């Protein structure tokens, strides 16, 4: 299945080993199920069943005379069996049914190649999209108490490095009554994030160039460290002021309950694979090959972790590697150190980006704090906004970004779905 916009100019499905953009369309090279044909006498229900079977088996219809009406997976796929038994995944989107506030469901999705499980709610602005409303771990049952009435779906992503034949899995789901939900631990009202600045975060090496920097430059960075610390903390508080995320400093007493941490460290972290080209970033400058070094500006810990979908771990941690913002050598200096304002923008908005991952926000395609291209966020005033979700994958040594036009991230809806006052 493909969750891109529906192609009304249908073409015949053909046998292929290529995966869909969403990661699960067995052996059908067509961009979506709308591209399959069926006999003209087939009714809508028959067409729908045949489409699902074709998706499962990678089969094709031939000799068809009439185009199939476009299949909208958010309205046309049937609700899966909610009987508490495992069922084979037939698509990357599994409808879970309609729920009222106070109800809920339990779901478990298993599969060696499955990378993530997200819960979507039907978008109120269009019937052709779903909005991320939480999620949970792969291979473990998790409960989902409904805080927003609507139609819900389970959306899976496969590891792009796996073969198409290995992209299989099962889903087990069942409804939870209001009385069942009442027995669950109530959702947290918010998330506290403590911001920590390590000693020498601007100078060891931080933004000081150990290859070509002067002692005067290092002393200047030391002199402004307290100012930058205060400005960054203030900017983070302003960014999250209207959200359930509370930012506190090192000297603040954390409230009762779990606390996440964001640490600004002075280290420079190199990416493991220096040969990968990120198509979302500016192309390398051939005049300065010595500067083409891939660095990691920030990450969820431990290194290599992904976003905490659904904020299942309220005590997770992330880092901003301040040393990665400075090039090494006179020809590789960056614009970050051109002004104090640049320094504050660069490391504060990178910190906000990592906090977004800590609570489960994904990358988005538009210029936003959650945009995957860090350089785009360095020197401009950005916010968290509604946008189409972006996933990255490696193809022939390049990082290629896929924008899922029918999977929406709306931070306000997401925050309402995972953070809420206790249900009385």
Image (spheres, rainbow, N blue to C red):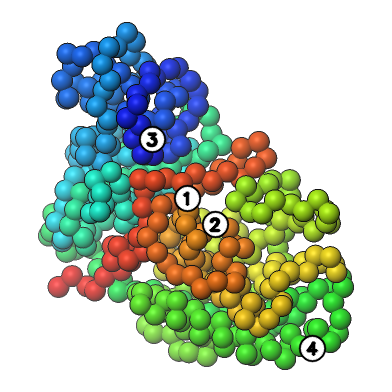
Q: Secondary structure at mark 4?
A: helix
Which residue is disc 4 drawn over? Answer: 219
Q: CA distance from mark 3 to mark 1?
A: 14 Å
Q: Earlier in the sequence, mark 2 or mark 4?
A: 4
Crowdedness near tag 1: few (<14), some (14–19) or many (≥20) residues, C-alpha within 10 Å: many
Q: Earlier in the sequence, mark 4 or mark 1?
A: 4
Crowdedness near tag 3: few (<14), some (14–19) or many (≥20) residues, C-alpha within 10 Å: many
Q: Earlier in the sequence, mark 1 or mark 2?
A: 2
Q: Relative to residue 302, is residue 73 depicted above or below?
A: above
Mark linked to residue 372? 2
Crowdedness near tag 2: few (<14), some (14–19) or many (≥20) residues, C-alpha within 10 Å: many
Q: Position of residue 122 (x, y in %)?
A: 25, 50
Between 415 and 368, the residue placed more toward the observer is: 368
The residue at the point 30 percent across, 49 percent down is 130
Q: CA distance from mark 1 to mark 2?
A: 8 Å
Q: Which of the 4 quarters of the picture holds residue 253? A: bottom left
Between 405 and 90, the residue placed more toward the observer is: 405
Mark linked to residue 2? 3
Q: CA distance from mark 2 to mark 4?
A: 33 Å
Residue 189 appears anywhere in the view: yes
Q: CA distance from mark 2 to mark 3?
A: 22 Å
Which residue is disc 1 drawn over? Answer: 390
Q: Relative to residue 348, is residue 324 depicted above or below?
A: above
> Do the residues under discs 3 and 4 have CB atoms within 8 angstroms?
no
> Do the residues under discs 1 and 2 have CB atoms within 8 angstroms?
yes
Q: Position of residue 226 (x, y in %)?
A: 64, 90
Between 264 and 218, the residue placed more toward the observer is: 218
């Amino acid at each position: 299945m493909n969750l891109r916009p529906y192609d009304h100019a249908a073409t015949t499905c053909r046998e292929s080993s290529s995966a869909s953009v969403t990661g699960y369309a067995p052996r059908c090279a067509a961009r979506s199920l709308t591209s399959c044909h069926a006999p003209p006498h087939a009714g809508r229900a028959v067409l729908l069943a045949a489409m699902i079977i074709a998706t499962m088996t990678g089969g094709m219809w031939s000799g068809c005379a009439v185009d199939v009406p476009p299949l909208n997976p958010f309205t046309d796929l049937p609700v899966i069996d909610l009987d508490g038994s495992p069922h084979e995944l037939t698509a990357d989107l599994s409808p879970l049914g309609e729920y009222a506030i106070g109800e809920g469901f339990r779901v478990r999705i298993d599969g060696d190649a499955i990378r993530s499980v997200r819960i979507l709610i039907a978008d109120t602005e269009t019937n052709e999209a779903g909005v991320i409303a939480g999620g949970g771990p792969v291979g473990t049952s998790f409960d989902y108490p409904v805080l927003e009435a609507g139609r819900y779906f389970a959306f899976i992503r496969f590891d792009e490095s796996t073969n198409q034949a290995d992209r299989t899995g099962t889903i087990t789901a069942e409804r939870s009554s209001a009385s069942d939900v009442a027995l669950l631990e109530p959702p947290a009202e918010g998330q506290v994030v403590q911001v920590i600045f390590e000693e020498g975060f601007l100078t060891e090496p931080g933004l000081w160039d150990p290859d070509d920097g002067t002692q005067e430059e290092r002393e200047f960075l030391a002199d402004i460290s307290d100012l930058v610390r205060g400005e960054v903390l203030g900017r983070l508080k302003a960014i999250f002021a209207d959200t359930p995320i509370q930012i506190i400093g090192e000297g603040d007493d954390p409230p009762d309950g779990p606390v996440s941490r964001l640490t600004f460290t002075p280290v420079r972290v190199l990416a493991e694979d220096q040969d990968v080209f990120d198509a979302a970033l500016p192309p390398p400058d051939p005049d300065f090959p010595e500067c083409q070094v891939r660095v990691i500006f920030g990450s969820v810990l431990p290194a290599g972790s992904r976003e905490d979908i659904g904020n299942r771990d309220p005590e997770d941690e992330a880092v901003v590697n301040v040393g990665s913002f400075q090039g090494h050598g006179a020809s590789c200096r960056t614009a970050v150190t051109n002004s104090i304002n640049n320094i504050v923008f660069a490391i504060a908005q990178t910190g906000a980006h990592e906090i977004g991952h800590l609570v489960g926000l994904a990358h988005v395609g538009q210029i936003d704090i959650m945009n995957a291209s860090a350089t785009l966020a360095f020197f401009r005033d950005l916010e968290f906004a509604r946008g189409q979700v972006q996933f990255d994958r490696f193809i022939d040594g390049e990082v290629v970004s896929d924008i899922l036009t029918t999977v929406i991230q709306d931070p306000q809806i997401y925050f309402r779905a995972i953070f809420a006052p206790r249900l009385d």
